[in-house]
Image (tube, grey):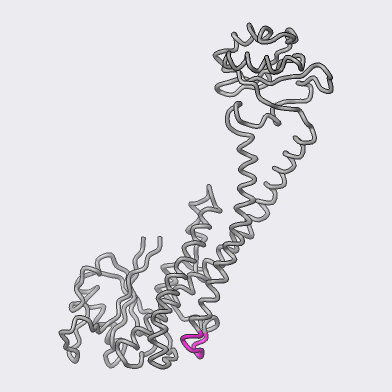
């Protein structure tokens, strides 16, 4: 797991001097972090009232966009199923891995024009993330329904002989069909009771056709036997079979229904394969879009909080520092930056902005 901190500090005469000071205290002296410049353009500042309101809105938007990023990533893992080892290679931002995108971050002027106000840019991102979220819900619902219906049919053809569908096991010639008096029953017999079945099935009820039983299929535990008897003896036969721990399966041979079930499974399987490729491509594209939007929200928050806290214009192009570290949290704030011209004992007033770390795998 990778942890990133976005740090903004009041600048020296140049941003490079601030950067050099950061490098001294975090890498050259203590080797606490790997630092990168996080480039934020010269955005429109606006009025103080707008900035104060925007600060709260951006915090909420940050949480929302992050949730969209995570939902898209999680659904990518769900869709890939047995190929989850390929999830990471599909979760890219602008065609590069996420660490590379963050450490080489450049503001996307085409998506988020800096001539727009901060409020407008945040609204663009909000609409974009909301659209991705809504589209994901719709696509996931359709694909999950398709997948669920297919799994239900597959489950019917799996499991033990006591519960699974028998349609793909039996054949037409296994049954006495279109008889007014005779009927073929299917009975599940434990393997340990084969001999008992052969010895007793003819006496479980009156009017069982002698030597009519036949082993049709067997799994690890049981065998499926057919037996023919008169229709009037069915209830008595079921009762006696249950007493002897033989399970009669209720099954009527219907070619049309069996054919329809097979066609439905084929259709669902084909539809799932058709939807899989486009869905994965959509997830890749929109994960990238959501992640890019999320990092731009981070940039907006750094910019707004810097202006509100420092009350000075933000110097382009590097008002923020990007730190990747597991140990940086152990540094107390006064040790991080010391500015000769800034001396204060007020704990509530900070002279740099450190956003809570954000993570991704």
Is residue 80 positioned above or below 345 on the image?
above
Q: Which residue: 39% across, 73% down?
A: 103
Residue plotted at (79% across, 21% down): 173
- Residue 274 is left or right of residue 95, and the answer is right
Q: Residue 158's x, y, as percent?
A: 60, 33
Is 250 or 175 nearer to us in this picture?
A: 250
**The quadrant where residue 282 appears:** bottom right
The percent position of residue 147, horizontal first and vertical second, equals: 61, 49
Q: Nearer the viewer, residue 319 or 142?
A: 142
Q: Closer to the camera, 59 or 285?
A: 59
Using the image, determine if residue 48 lies above or below residue 73.
below
At x 57%, y 71%, the residue is 131
Depicted 143 relative to depicted 153: above or below: below
Q: Position of residue 180 (x, y in %)?
A: 84, 19
Residue 240, located in which quarter of the rendered image?
A: top right
Could you tell me which residue is drawn at 78 percent across and 25 percent down?
172
Q: Residue 207 is drawn in which quadrant?
A: top right
Q: What secondary structure predominates along the stretch shown in magenta?
A: loop
Place of residue 124 in the rendered image (x, y in percent of width and height, measured from the top left): 53, 80
- Location of the C terminus by quadrant is bottom left
Q: Is residue 115 magenta?
A: yes
Magenta-span inclusion, residue 60: no
In the displayed structure, 134 sits above or below 124; it is: above
Magenta residue span? 113-120
Q: Is residue 256 left or right of residue 10?
A: right
């Amino acid at each position: 797991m990778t942890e990133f901190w976005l740090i903004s500090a009041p600048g020296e005469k140049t941003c490079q001097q601030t950067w050099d000071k950061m490098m001294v205290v975090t890498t050259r002296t203590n080797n606490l972090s790997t630092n990168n410049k996080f480039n934020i353009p010269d955005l429109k500042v606006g009025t103080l009232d707008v900035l104060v309101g925007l600060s709260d809105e951006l915090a909420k938007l940050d949480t929302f966009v992050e949730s969209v990023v995570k939902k898209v990533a999680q659904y990518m893992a769900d869709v890939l199923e047995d190929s989850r080892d390929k999830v990471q290679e599909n979760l890219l931002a602008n065609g590069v891995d996420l660490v590379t995108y963050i450490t080489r971050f450049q503001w996307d002027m085409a998506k988020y024009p800096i001539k727009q106000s901060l409020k407008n840019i945040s609204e663009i991102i909000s609409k974009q993330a909301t659209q991705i979220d809504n589209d994901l819900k719709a696509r996931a619902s359709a694909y999950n329904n398709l997948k669920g219906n297919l799994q239900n049919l597959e489950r019917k053809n799996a499991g033990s002989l006591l519960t699974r569908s028998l349609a793909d096991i039996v054949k037409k010639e296994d049954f006495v069909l279109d008889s007014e008096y005779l009927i073929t029953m299917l009975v599940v017999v434990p393997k340990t009771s084969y001999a008992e079945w052969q010895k007793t099935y003819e006496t479980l009820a009156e009017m069982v056709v002698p030597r009519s039983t036949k082993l049709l299929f067997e799994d690890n535990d049981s065998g499926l036997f057919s037996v023919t008897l008169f229709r009037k003896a069915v209830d008595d036969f079921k009762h006696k079979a249950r007493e002897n721990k033989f399970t009669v399966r209720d099954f009527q041979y219907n070619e049309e229904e069996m054919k329809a079930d097979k066609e439905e499974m084929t259709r669902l399987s084909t539809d799932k394969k058709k939807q899989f490729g486009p869905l994965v491509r959509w997830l890749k594209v929109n994960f990238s879009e959501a992640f890019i939007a999320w990092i731009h929200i981070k940039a907006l928050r750094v910019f707004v909080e810097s202006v509100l806290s420092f009350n000075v214009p933000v110097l382009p192009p590097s008002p923020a520092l990007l730190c990747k570290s597991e140990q940086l949290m152990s540094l107390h704030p006064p040790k991080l930056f010391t500015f000769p011209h800034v001396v204060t004992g007020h704990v509530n007033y900070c002279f740099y902005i450190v956003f809570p770390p954000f993570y991704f795998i």
